[in-house]
């Protein structure tokens, strides 16, 4: 793997802990689903780090709203039913672990998918690690690295 994208297992070594908080991270919606719905084996280190306070998950209300919307998609509803979860359970996980902050100013790097821009903007503004599986974000990794932003494929 490249220096810009590597496994979540390297997460604690990436950045210093800030003001008693864990490593600042921004999680895209697919990563949140992997952690709180699919419980993917590869997402366990991230879930454990969230629970232990080793990461400071920074998010905005717009990110929570997007998650709430995605949780109503028929394919996701079917997965929630399969895992015997509710949308409320997933949103509770968001509320418990995410630290809401103001919407960030638009970053100079523009994403081809406007829905993903909010994750980039916040990660740049917060100097946070951006965890994503989204190809629109991953394809920008060199441009984002020039802004001091590290994109990591978490799963």
Image (tube, helix red, strand yellow):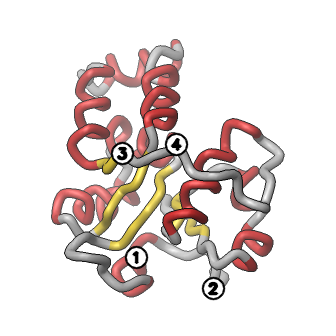
Task: State which tag comes first along the sequence, 1 or 4.
Answer: 1
The residue wearing badge 1 is 11
Say which residue appears at 26% left-offset and 65% top-offset. Answer: 49
In screen coordinates, is 20 left or right of 149? left
* Mark 2 residue crowding within 10 angstroms, few (<14) / some (14–19) / many (20+): few
- Provide the residue designation for mark 4: 30
Instruction: Report how far apart the C-alphas of labels 1 and 4 lie in the structure.
Output: 18 Å
Q: CA distance from mark 4 to mark 2?
A: 22 Å
Disc with the residue nearer the chain's start (3 vs 4): 4
**Contact, mark 1 vs mark 3 (Cβ under 8 Å):** no
Q: CA distance from mark 2 to mark 1?
A: 12 Å
Residue 145: assigned label: none
| Residue 83 versus residue 121 in the image, above or below | above
- Residue position for label 2: 3
Picture quadrant where residue 124 is located: bottom right
Q: Are marks 2 and 1 in contact (CB under 8 Å)?
A: no
């Amino acid at each position: 793997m490249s220096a810009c994208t590597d496994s979540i297992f390297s997460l604690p070594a990436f950045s210093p802990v800030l003001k008693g908080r864990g490593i600042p991270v921004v999680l895209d919606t697919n990563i949140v689903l992997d952690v709180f719905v699919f419980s993917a084996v590869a997402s366990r280190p991230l879930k454990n780090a969230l629970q232990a306070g080793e990461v400071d998950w920074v998010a905005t209300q717009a990110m929570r709203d997007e998650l709430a919307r995605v949780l109503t998609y028929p394919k996701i509803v079917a997965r929630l039913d399969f895992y015997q979860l509710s949308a409320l359970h997933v949103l509770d996980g968001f509320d418990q672990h995410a630290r809401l902050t103001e919407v960030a100013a638009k970053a100079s790097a523009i994403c081809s998918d406007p829905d993903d821009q909010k994750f980039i903007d916040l990660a740049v503004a917060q100097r946070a690690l951006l965890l994503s599986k989204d190809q629109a974000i991953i394809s920008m990794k060199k441009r984002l690295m020039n802004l001091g932003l590290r994109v990591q494929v978490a799963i």
